[in-house]
Amino acid sequence: MIREIIITSRNPDGTTQIAPMGVRQDGAHYVLAPFRPSRTLDNLTRERHAVVNFTDDVCVFAGCLTGRYDWPLCAATRVPVQRLQESLGHAELEVKEFEDDVQRPRFLCAVVHQETHAPFTGFNRAQAAVLEAAILVSRLHMLPAEKIQGELEYLRVAVEKTAGERERLAWSWLEARIVEFGSTAVPRSAAS
């Protein structure tokens, strides 16, 4: 099973990299497989620590994919990486094994500390729709425009029916990014 979470890792200058990522659990370990190239990949290779942040705030996911990285952070308990201050919980990770790959290297990480900060009260359909739209935005360079538009039309129904203020804001950021990408994209037929 893949879980959509926010990974925080430490950049060479000491700042924090915040990135949405789908991660797998393998027993007591997390498997992180960032695409090459990425700051998260470089940070994991160099620092050997990261934090998995559990959040139901879809603005963080949408924000990271649309250039908004200014989320409140605080120190983690046992690893030298900051965590999202307003997360529901977090798990602090240490890299135990590395498996190289041309496209997506894999890091097997052990949990060295875990905390719960607030209760999870459940998702609404709009949150799930925003997460799916965020995944589409992360793949704009790989998917045909027709597929993206078809998926968005379906997801928009859930947002219109069930969204709160945060979900509407996150959705608007993602829609704007898609429009921006479309205005700069070269049509596939012209690129062939």
Image (cartoon, rainbow, N blue to C red):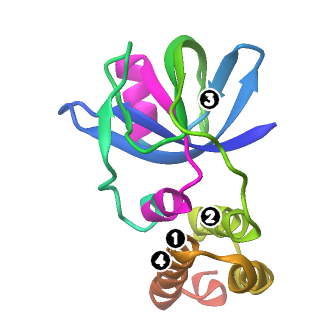
Which numbered circle lies on residue 3? none
Q: Give the Cα distance between marks 4 and 2.
A: 15 Å
Q: Distance from label 1 to label 3 (Cα)?
A: 37 Å
Distance between the Cα atoms at labels 2 and 1? Answer: 23 Å
Mark 3 touches mark 4? (CB < 8 Å): no
Residue that numbered label 1 is attached to: 166
Q: Amino acid at mark 4?
A: Trp
Residue 101: mark = 3
Neighbour tally class for label 2: few under 14, some 14-19, many 20 plus, Cα within 10 Å: few
**Observer-nearest of 97 and 14:** 14
Q: Earlier in the sequence, mark 3 or mark 2?
A: 3
Mark 1, secondary structure of its residue: helix
Q: Position of residue 26 (x, y in %)?
A: 76, 20
Evaluate if marks 2 and 1 touch, with contact meaning CB atoms under 8 Å apart: no
N-term-proximal mark, 4 vs 2: 2
Cα distance between the residues tagged 3 and 2: 20 Å
